[in-house]
Amino acid sequence: MTEYICSLCPRSCHAVRTETSGQGFCRMGTLPKVARIAPHFWEEPCISGTKGSGTIFFSGCTLACVFCQNYVISQEHHGTVMTVSELIQAMQTLVQQGVHNINLVSPTPYLESILECFSVYRPPVPVVYNTGGYEKTDSLRRLDGLVDIYLPDLKYIRSDVSEKYSRAKDYAAYALPAIHEMVRQTGKPVFDENGLLQKGTVVRHLILPQNTKNSIAVLETLQSELGDDILVSLMGQYLPMGKAADYPEINRRITKREYEKVLAVYENLGLDGYIQELSSADSAYVPDFGERITAAKEKVTIADESP
C-alpha cells in the first residue's frame, strides 16, 4: 500500500498516509511502527498467565491522553517501522517463546496492515486487540472472526473530561457502541481449564485524580448496558506521566479515599472482573520503551521481560 486516505478511527481525518508517514491525527504511516515486542506479565491474570502475554506495542494513537504512561510512543512516536512480513515473524517468535496470546497494543492506525498479516498468518493462540476504546464500529467489524479477546478502555462518560484530557469530546459516543460491537463478536468470557481467557471482552477503567464522578458514571453505564457480558478491570495504577504536570488537578496519584469511593461502587454494582490495588501505581510496571527493538528483513530482536 503506497498511499491511503484514512478514516479508520473517529477522527475521520481523511488524511493522506504513505507507508512511512502520515498527515492525520496519529501522524503514522500505514506500515506498523513498533516500539516494543515482549512477553508481558503485568496484564490481567487471565491474559498474562504464567508465561506472559505476547505484546506488540505500536507507536501512535487515536487519542492524545495528556497522562498517558506510554506517552513516548503514543505521542512522541518512538519505534521502528516494520513490514507486514516482519510483523508476522515477530508474532511467530513470540508464539515460539510460549506466550499465552498475541496482544496488539494500540493497533488501530495499522488496521490495514494487520488485516493483511492475518490473511497470511493466524496465530495458534488467542489474538488480543488492546485499545483505548475510541473506535469506529465499521472498522471493528472488519476484525470479526479474527480477534478472540478485546481489551478496550472505557476512560470517560463525561464529555467535558474526555475533551480536556484526550481531545475527544465525542469519546463516549464512539466507545460505548464500539464495546457493544466487541461483545457481539466475542460473546461472554470463555476460559480454559487453567483460568486463561480464550474469548471475551475485558473493559478497563483507570481512576483519575479528582474525577471519581466520571469513574462512577463509567461503572454504572457498564453495568446497565453490558452486565455480565463483560469483565471489568478497575485500575488504580494512575501515575502523573506525559503532560500531566500541565494539569494540576491530575498531577498526583489517586488518594486512598478516591480509590475506595470508586471501589465501593464497583462492588455494590456486582461487577465481575479484576481490581487493581493502589500499590500497582509504580513506575516499575511501566514498559521500558528505551529498550528498542531491531527490525530487519531477516531478524526481529525481541525485548526480554520477566516478572
Image (cartoon, rainbow, N blue to C red):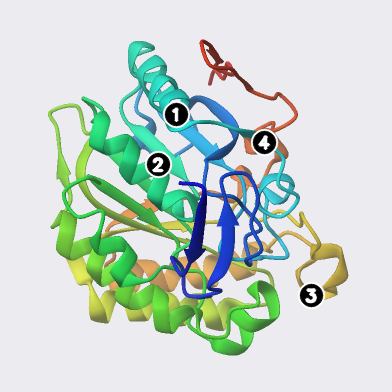
Q: Position of residue 113 (x, y in %)?
A: 41, 43
Verify CB contact (< 8 Å) between mark 2 and mark 1.
Answer: no
Above or below, 258 relative to 77: below
Q: Residue at x 71, y 47 (%)?
A: 77
Query: Tag 2: residue type?
Result: Glu
Q: Nearer the viewer, residue 11 or 177?
A: 11
Verify CB contact (< 8 Å) between mark 1 and mark 4.
Answer: no
Crowdedness near tag 1: few (<14), some (14–19) or many (≥20) residues, C-alpha within 10 Å: many
Cα distance in 3D space between marks 2 and 1 = 24 Å
Q: Secondary structure at mark 2?
A: loop
Verify CB contact (< 8 Å) between mark 3 and mark 4.
Answer: no
Query: Tag 3: residue type?
Result: Glu
Residue that numbered label 2 is attached to: 44
Residue that numbered label 4 is attached to: 79
Upstream in sequence: badge 3 or badge 4? 4
What label sits on residue 87 in the rendered view?
A: 1
Q: Secondary structure at mark 3?
A: helix
Upstream in sequence: badge 2 or badge 1? 2
Q: Position of residue 207 (x, y in %)?
A: 57, 65
Residue 262 seen in the current view: yes
Q: Is residue 88 left or right of residue 120?
A: right
Verify CB contact (< 8 Å) between mark 2 and mark 4.
Answer: no
Cα distance in 3D space between marks 2 and 3 = 28 Å
Upstream in sequence: badge 1 or badge 3? 1
Residue that numbered label 3 is attached to: 249
Q: Is residue 67 left or right of residue 182?
A: right
Q: Position of residue 32 (x, y in %)?
A: 52, 40
Q: Secondary structure at mark 1?
A: helix
